[in-house]
Structures are given as C-alpha cells and as structure tokens.
Image (cartoon, grey):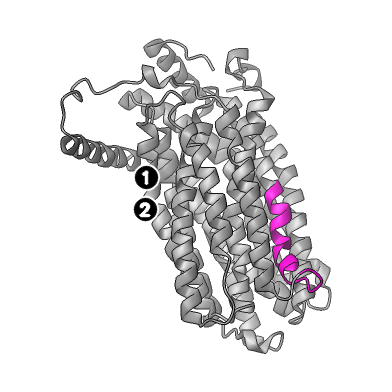
Amino acid sequence: MSTSDRHVTPPEDRLSNGQKFAYGLGSICNNLLGGAIGFMSIVLNVGLGMNPGLVGTLQAIPRLTDALTDPVMGYISDNTRTRYGRRRPYIFFGAIAMGLIFALMWQLPAGYSENFYFWFFLAGSIIFYLSYTVYATPWVALGYEMTPDYHERTRLMAVHNFMGQFAWISLPWFYAIMENDRLFTNSVQGARTLAIIIGIFVAVVGIMPAIFCKERFDPASQDQDSNSAGKTRMQGLIDNVKEFFKGLVITLKCGEFVKLCIGTFCLFNGIMLVGAFGSYIAIFYVAGGDTDLGAKYMGVLGTVNTASTLIAIYFVTWLAARIGKQKTFIIATACTLVSSIMKWWCYDPLIPWKILIPQPLCSVGMGGLFTLMGSMIADVCDMDELETGKRREGMFGSIYWWMVKLGMALAFAASGYLLNFTGFDVALGGAQSSSTFFWMRVVDVGVPVIASTISIIAVSMYQLTEQRSQEIRMELDKRHGKVKA
C-alpha cells in the first residue's frame, strides 16, 4: 500500500487527548508496580542477606500464580455485564486493592530468619499479584477496544507506553533512595517507607482510567445466552468453565497471535533474564563493589534509558505509519540486538561512563515492543471477531500477558541461579574472581542477542497487514453497523 493510499483516521474513531491521558495513567501504575518489585528486591539480598537463588524464586512463584489467573480474569472481564461496563469496575477496585497490599508486603520486621522472610514475602506477593491481575487484565483489554482504527490504536498505545516510561525514570533510583543514609538507617527501612508512598500513589492514580475512559461496547447490546434462564448455578458454572476452555483453545490456535507472543516472549523476557546481571555488573564490576556509587550508576543508566525510550516511542509511532507495524518492529528489535553486542566493550571499570553508550540503541527495541504489540493484538481481536462473532479482548490480553508473566517467572527464577552459577558471592563485594565477572558478562550479552534474533524471525512471519486489517474492519462494519467511539 503506497503512502498516498494509506487510511486516514475518521473523526469518529479518534480518541480525545483526555481519554488517552487517563489510559496512560494506568500505564504509569502498571509499570511502577511491575518494576518496583524487581528493583526493590535487591534489598532482600543486600539488606537481609538472602541467597540470590531464593530471591529469584520469590519473584518467580508469585508471577507464575499471577500468570495462571490472568486468563480466568480475562474471561470474567469479557463476560461481565454491569451498568458501568465490562472493564471499569475491576479497574477501579483493583487499583485500590493492589496499592494497599503492595504497601503492606514490604513491612518486613527486623531480626528474623531467612526462612521467615521467604514465607512472609511469598505470601504477600501472591496476594498482591491476585489484586494486580484484577486491575491489569481489564485495563489492557480496555485499551484494545477503545478505538477500532488501525492507526489510532498505535497512537493510543504510543501514549500509554510514553507515559508508562515516566515510572522508569524513578525506578532505577529506588535502590539509591533506600540506601540513602541521610534518609534511613538501612535499606530495609527505606523499602518500608518507599512502599507506602508507592501504594498511596497507585491507589489514587490507578482509578483514573475507570473514571474517565469510555468502553466502546454497550454491555446490554452484547449477546446473551438465551438458554441461561432457569439454569441452576451449578449448570451455569459448568457452562462457563466449558466456554472458558473453548475460548482459551481458540485463542491459542490463532496463528498471528502466537507469532506476536513468541516475538514478545523472547525479546522482553530475554532482557528481563539479564536485568539483574546489569545491576550487579554496575555495582560490583564497574563500581568495584561500592554500593552507593553503583546505585548512582544504576540511576543514571535508568534515566538515560527512559529518556531514550521516550524518543524511541515517538520515532516508532512515526515509522509504523509509513512502513507498517511489522517492519518497524523488526528494525527496532535489530537495534536492541546490536546494542547488546556493544555492551561487551562498554562495561569498563577504568572508563565507567561507557556503560551508558549502548543504552539509547537498546531503548529503540523496548520502546517499540509494547507500542506496536498492543496495536497489533487489537488488530488480531478484529480478525477473531470476524471468525468467531465475539469480542474477546480480555482473553487475548490475558493470554498475552500470561505468556509475558510466565516468561518473567522463569526469567527471575533462572537469573538468581545463573548468578550463583557464575560464582558470584555478595560477601566478596568487588573482589569477585575474573572468571565470575567474565561469565556474568557472557550471560548479560549473549542472552539478549539470541532472544532478539528469535523475536525478529517470529514477527517476520506475521501476515496481518494494514490493508487486510482495513478489509476486516469494513466487513465487521457491514455485519453489525458502525460502532461509534
């Protein structure tokens, strides 16, 4: 399709800046909580002395349970019928619950055993992720359905991804804040206070999408089971279970969706797997074991990453409107691949600032990932409606994030044990062996390179083009009339 032939978004399909902003506030909360546990969990090792393998397990198990509940929540959200919509009630109450629970789970008492801290934090994490699912799954689904337009979807996802990056401005500084001797007696006390501040912020800001965003589909107009009247509760439950698994199978058999899942799984979780390695390399290799100096490097690195990602989101959105979402994703991911290779020469204790050099290029891939994937999955939802006659944004969104979280669970579990495999010993500080530092760098560089390559191959086979998406939209409009935004 030539540039001159490209579709122009009609006024009725455009979203107001207010709705985009409100939806983006949900992204800030989503990223803030999702990243806070990872950045704050270093306190469990450095502050409380827990084994890195146990810390990785602590992060993996709750995410695994969270991943298992996501599809259930997606099905519930798709089939909820209230005067306030299918998504908004869950977003409202979920924000309040997850903010409160997050604040409580970090109130770790002093003077207890490693075993106590493991079970205390594990129980709190599982409860937290249940509330997180109640919020995040309907919020993701809401974004997929807010507009039916091919390009407006990308712009909405760009706004939400752009705003979500503001959470990452603060996240890399969390460890520096918790380690600040002028504010707290130790990092554990710092974690307690920081968690309360985050919890209050999330509870207040997280409800905004529920208040100000609109759902496109009237719950009263959705198809209802004409045979539901007179059914017993048990029969209704059995029917719902059957429908859930039927929808699950249909979703997993959608080839274009699976390609997007593979692309995301490899790229995102490949980066997540080595995320801890980057922190440990910055502190113990580049900074020579000086935790305060290493924390500052982490903060600066995170700030550069966020600033670069903000620019990358704008670039990716602009490029996708001209060459298509698929090609743009491949180019952006190739940038991440190249930047990962560059890291081998940029971890240099003699010239510490070189650690910043690969980051802007890496940000292109991560900036494009959720901007483009969210928009492409929304296109897949239209294709699915054409084939099945149902709107199932909740199911697609939940399966997608189920896959992401399952990968995160495996990544966090593996990262702690990989760190142990390299021979790292926190008691040695910056005096780790040369072999340990060598293998830490091998993992930190090699995993993202392999993951990015697989991601590019998977998405290169995606076939839902802009032209085909427009054809699907016209067929859906003929089927049930144009749905006003």
Question: Which residue is labeled 1 in the image?
Answer: 71
Q: How many marks?
A: 2
Q: Amino acid at mark 1?
A: Pro
The percent position of residue 470, horizontal first and vertical second, equals 50, 20
User: Could you give the CA–CA distance between mark 2 and mark 1, rounded to whole angstroms?
Assistant: 7 Å
Q: Is residue 182 magenta?
A: yes
Identify the element where label 2 is drawn.
helix
Report x, y in % for residue 266: 50, 55
Characterize the magenta stretch by its predominant secondary structure. helix
Residue 428 quadrant = bottom right
Q: Relative to residue 53, is residue 231 drawn left or right?
A: left
In front here: 197 or 283? 197
Where is 122 relative to 200, above or below? Answer: below
Q: Start and end of the magenta stretch?
A: 166-183
Label 2–label 1 contact, CB within 8 A: yes
Vertical side of 452 occupied by 324: above or below:
above
Q: Within the magenta stretch, is there residue 205? A: no
Q: Residue at x 65, y 72 (%)?
A: 188
Image location (x, y in percent) of residue 186: 71, 75
The residue that disc 2 covers is 68
Q: Quadrant of the N terminus?
A: top right
